[in-house]
Image: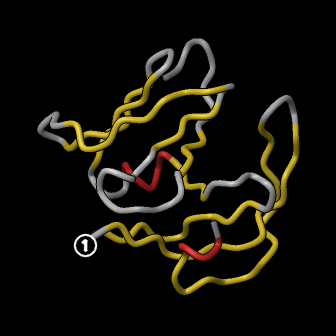
Amino acid sequence: DRSQLLNFVQKFLGTVKFRNDHVAKIMGYGDYKIGNVTILRVYFVKGLGHNLFSVGQFCDSDLEVAFRQHTCFIHNLDGVDLLTGSRGKNLYTLSLQDMIESSPICLLSKASKTKS
């Protein structure tokens, strides 16, 4: 949802693939504010229906991300779970409705069978 992004920069940045090889354009980025936390460079993907950011953005903020078959967890370095997401059709989503009313945000991660 582009309306959730602050300081939006409209710029074509490439494409992402999701849902049975559907390709969508990354049409820009902005900052996503959740309470007193701001996540920088959250991507707006036309047609996805969610705002997109990478696992690296959590890691850059000293958070850890763990993926399981149907769930993902974001926790701090002390192991305290901060957010929990669910997987549907190879896309992990986080609903931040418990923290603030907003549209869901998606995590995009690509891992091989030998790497996590």
Q: Quadrant of residue 75?
A: top left
Quadrant in which the N terminus appears: bottom right
Q: Is residue 25 above or below residue 110?
A: below
Q: Quadrant of residue 41?
A: bottom right
Residue 15 image point, x, y percent: 82, 55
Question: Does residue 53 appear to the left or right of 37 in the view shown?
Answer: right
* Amino acid type, callout 1: Asn
Mark 1 nearby-residue class (10 Å; few <14, some 14–19, many ≥20): few
Residue 35 image point, x, y percent: 28, 69
Question: Residue at the location (79% across, 33% down)?
Answer: 19
Q: How is the image coloured?
A: secondary structure
Question: Does residue 14 appear to the left or right of 113 in the view shown?
Answer: right
Question: Does residue 75 appear to the left or right of 55 in the view shown?
Answer: left
Question: Residue at the location (70% across, 54% down)?
Answer: 49
Residue 116 image point, x, y percent: 49, 23
Q: Is residue 44 above or below residue 89?
A: below
Of all residues shown, which one is farthest toward the left?
A: 78
Q: Quadrant of residue 61?
A: bottom left
Count of marks, rendered view = 1
Residue 9 image point, x, y percent: 66, 83
Question: Residue at the location (35% across, 66% down)?
Answer: 34
Question: Residue at the location (82% across, 72% down)?
Answer: 12
Mark 1 element type: loop
Camera-nearest residue between 114 and 15: 15
Q: Is residue 58 above or below residue 89?
A: below
In this figure, which residue is indicated by the disc labeled 1? 36
